[in-house]
Amino acid sequence: MATQQNHGGVPFAIAHDMQHFRLLELPPEIVELLEAPNPPRLSIKSLPSSVASGTPASNPAYAVFCTPNASFQLRQVQTSNTLFITRPMLEAHGNEMPVPTTCAIATCSATLEMHPAHGSALAYLEDLLPLYDIIDGEVNAAANGKTKASIFPDVPLSDGEFERAWRETMAFEFDGSSWRPSANTLSHVWKSINAAALAEGVKLDSQFLTDDVTKAVAEEGYPTALAAAILQRLSNDDQDKEGPWSCLDRTKIVSFVGKVLLEAKRGAPPYLTAEFLDTWKDCVPEVCRKDAELKTIAGVYELPSTATIRLKQVASSATNAEASAPKGSTSSRKWHEKFGKTRQKK
């Protein structure tokens, strides 16, 4: 250990075996979390190297610092100044009395800065989750063999951001894998939910037991978890998302059904506008029929002619295009066919 000391100065020593450190500059919001009485768990995450090349927009993998609900990208900044990490110690030479000394145990030539990350959790979900599609009554999907819990740690965003995207996408776990539903699947399952509620006398815009509807939907061969994800996505903002009860928001129902119907028609000839409006009204609870108007989904559709309507080409989709996969069968029982005639059209 080398020591320098001028008369009357502070003894300074440099360790022979320097340690490795990185300095991390913390923004005020992180400092506030750390100084809280019960600081939350913080983590550093990144995409696994095996999938980094397939990240959205082909961006290289990078590390992010995550709080429960926000994420910050870590950037290394080089410095031309000599920066020492020191610690106090007692040092003695020969038979002299030990004296307090400041010892440099590491040098830092770079600093890690934190900047708010702007990655899209929705984009990562589209990249990581296979599409669960239903075509002509058959399931068209390829399993990934991954649970929700196993996917979360590998996404370079906070758990809160990822959880919000999971609910927004209506992603679900089924048969040992995680999935995102296609617009066609959402259309099928929603019609089953609406018809089951009608058959059971359940008012979707009032408090009801979630299981009463999801179990009826499962009888048609649809995953219970997907039906629950749709109900959770459409529930009132103040509804307990984890509780046994549900209460759907009328505005969300009408907007969701209109968008899904248009998106499920993507790539096919456009709807006749009158036909679309009739179908839309038939697919929502009776109390919502009067709200099924084009102004409710303004900005989502376009009118290629005076008599037709289709999904606006630049509008973001709820799901990606269909993915090829092995086919499996699903039940052909249809609640909406059995009970559709009980509805009185206005």
Image: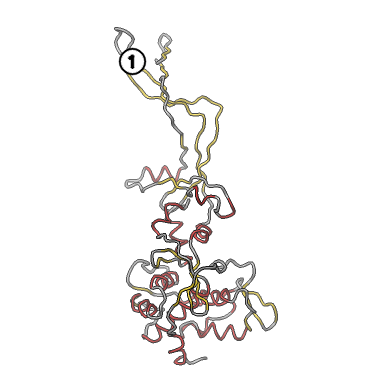
| Residue 252 to residue 100: above or below | below
Residue sitting at the far right: 305
Identify the residue shown where x is 44% and y is 81%.
192
| Residue 212 to residue 109: above or below | below
Q: Is residue 241 left or right of residue 340?
A: left
In the rendered image, residue 261, in percent from the top left (x then y), is placed at 55, 77
In the rendered image, residue 95, in percent from the top left (x then y), is placed at 29, 7
Residue matched to label 1: 91
Tell me where residue 303 sits by quadrant. bottom right
Identify the residue shown where x is 50% and y is 67%.
131
- The local crowd at label 1, few if under 14, some if 14 to 19, many if 20 or more residues have their Cα within 10 Å, is some
Residue type at the position of mark 1: Glu
Q: Is residue 212 left or right of residue 114?
A: left
Please state, as top left, top right, bottom left or bottom right, where the N terminus lies in the image: top left
Residue sitting at the far top: 95
Q: Is residue 346 left or right of residue 18?
A: right
What colour scheme was applied to this rendering of the protein? secondary structure
| Residue 82 to residue 72: above or below | above
Q: Nearer the viewer, residue 345 or 136?
A: 136
| Residue 38 to residue 139: above or below | above
Q: Nearer the viewer, residue 237 or 229?
A: 229
Question: Is disc 1 placed on a helix, strand or loop?
Answer: strand
Tell me where residue 224 sits by quadrant. bottom left
In the rendered image, residue 47, in percent from the top left (x then y), is placed at 48, 49
In the rendered image, residue 283, in percent from the top left (x then y), is placed at 50, 82
Identify the residue shown where x is 47% and y is 38%.
25
Q: Count numbered badges in the picture.
A: 1
Identify the residue shown where x is 32% and y is 14%.
99
